[in-house]
Image (tube, grey):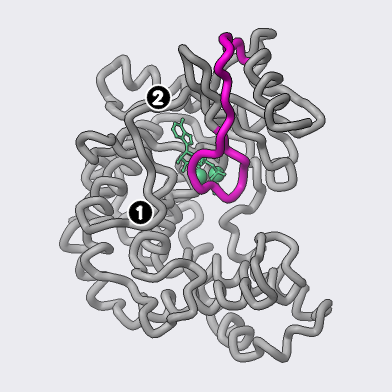
Amino acid sequence: MTSNSVATFLSEHFGLTGQQISLNPIGNGHINTTMLLKASQQSLVVQKLNTDVFPEPEQLVNNARLIEHHLTDKHHAGDYDLAIIRHVRTVNDNFLVNCEHGVWRALEFIGGSYSEDVVANIAQAQTAANAFGKFALALQDFDAKQLHSVIPHFHDLAMRAEKFKAVLQHDPVNRLAQCQVDVDFCLSQFDLIDELSALDGNIPLRACHNDTKINNMLFCSHSGNAKAVIDLDTCMPGYWLFDFGDMVRTFCSPEQEDSTNLANVRVREEIFAAIVKGYVAPLQHVITEQEKQSFWLGAKVMPFMIGLRFLTDFIDGDHYFATKHANHNLQRAQNQFALYKDILRKETTLKTILNINTL
Ligand code: ATP
Ligand code: MG
Ligand code: MG
């Protein structure tokens, strides 16, 4: 199928009419293929879903639609002021269309907006964290158990550790010798698993976003304010500490996730403070004391767990994460461990920030 015929196919299914139909890539998502389908009167975001990551796309759409409904009710009640990304029905009243080219869905396009791939400044970090906080607040009375676990055990460190140990046993592509130092470091950090399991039953299970990166936020082109939380693909039951920790992981370092300039990989305390301030403010009346305390663990666990997954994939021969060169996953792992170590080094300062801003 050519790009033109995909555009025609999608515009027919999603009811776009007119002569001037165009289909062009939009954004820098890593999981799905995201395009802007434009006709003279209307634009839609169309996404080819990654069915390797999400083998059951119907469940993904069901989850997102349940959240859309809930947020819409909140919006009508005056309790949610961000835009809501809604799925668009096909002319046959479905949400997914299959063609030889894959499984596609369409979302309402939020015009007058932009996304960022790297946090530009402290104010923007606070704005984004605040919007993720509003999103979390709006979902705090949503029954998280209604959501399908589209990726089971997504933030289950014990499971990630088991997978890591299994791959160490086989060393399928003989890479272990190259990363023994990193492997030994990981093996020395598994107390984190006990720290996490000690929380089970003591903090509430929440509907979490689970991918709180800066490019999963749309900003208003005019004001720079947050316009919408997007990418609800991994919304699943979990703990808020994971959403908090993933913001720390992805906002705080001045270096990209795969940078090899490890000397500059560090947690910027002022960005950390902005995340705490922005995220906790909307939640202050509903967050429990133990949940607040657990954010420290979230900040530690997320860089460590993602680093562990990169290292596991490196030893396994790069099957999960797309790589640009042979050592890419190892470099990403080392980058995440550098961030994790800096977080450990700054424990006193970061805990002080958490307490000052949350109590
Ligand atoms: P990730 O790698 O974070 O999992 P993804 O592949 O799931 O990303 P999305 O985050 O859904 O893809 O979309 C990718 C990009 O497309 C966004 O960062 C944003 O720039 C743009 N985008 C997505 N949905 C919309 C929308 N409804 N309106 C405007 N732009 C959008
Ligand atoms: Mg995304
Ligand atoms: Mg996504």
Q: Report whether 77 appears left or right of 92.
A: left
Ligand 3 picture quarter: top right
Q: Nearer the viewer, residue 313 or 118?
A: 118
For image coordinates 63% across by 17% down, the residue present is 11
- Please identify the quadrant where the C terminus is shown: bottom left
What kind of residue is marked 1?
Glu
Q: Earlier in the sequence, mark 1 or mark 2?
A: 2
Q: CA distance from mark 1 to mark 2?
A: 23 Å
For image coordinates 31% across by 39% down, the residue present is 219
The residue under label 2 is 71
What kind of residue is marked 2?
Leu
Q: Which mark is residue 291?
A: 1
For image coordinates 35% across by 54% down, the residue present is 291
Q: Mostly what secondary structure, the magenta segment? A: loop
Q: Is residue 145 above or below residue 344?
A: above
Q: Identify the image quadrant of residue 357.
A: bottom left
Q: Nearer the viewer, residue 194 or 22?
A: 22
